[in-house]
Image (cartoon, rainbow, N blue to C red):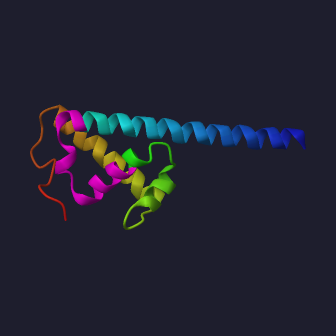
Amino acid sequence: MRSHANKLVNCDAANINKSLEAARLQMELIRQMEDLGIVEELPAPLFELVMARKKNPSITLKELGQTLPRPISKSTVEYRWRKLETMLRKQSKGDDANVLRKGRR
């Protein structure tokens, strides 16, 4: 019984650490995008995700998705962060052709 309880506690601790590390990396991504001045140029869904993370720096991806005006799933949140990472990578390399769509929809 004690072994099972320890496993549950360790699993919870690992999940919390994983969520906090993901949030830290996302905040760093946001900082880099702000340094490049591209946050304001993001399409509406990505801009909303960035603003939601800034307001909620330590919540899980699932919770983050639920804070949006039109709630989305954890997998959609993950997809959008990967898209933001790709956009930042391309922007940082100077390959900004068609990376950002002008205006929000």
Which image quadrant: the C terminus?
bottom left
Residue 51 vs residue 73: left or right?
Answer: left
The residue shown at (72%, 37%) is: 10
Residue 5 falls within the magenta-colored stretch: no
Relative to 83, residue 74 above or below: below
Image x and y of residue 71, in percent: 42, 65
Image x and y of residue 18, in percent: 55, 38
What secondary structure is the magenta-colored segment mainly? helix
Q: Of all residues shown, which one is farthest toward the bottom? A: 70
Relative to 62, residue 17 above or below: above
Which image quadrant: the N terminus?
top right
The residue shown at (49%, 35%) is: 21
Residue 48 vs residue 8: left or right?
Answer: left
Residue 95 vs residue 29: left or right?
Answer: left
Segment colored magenta: 34-52
Residue 35 vs residue 96: left or right?
Answer: right
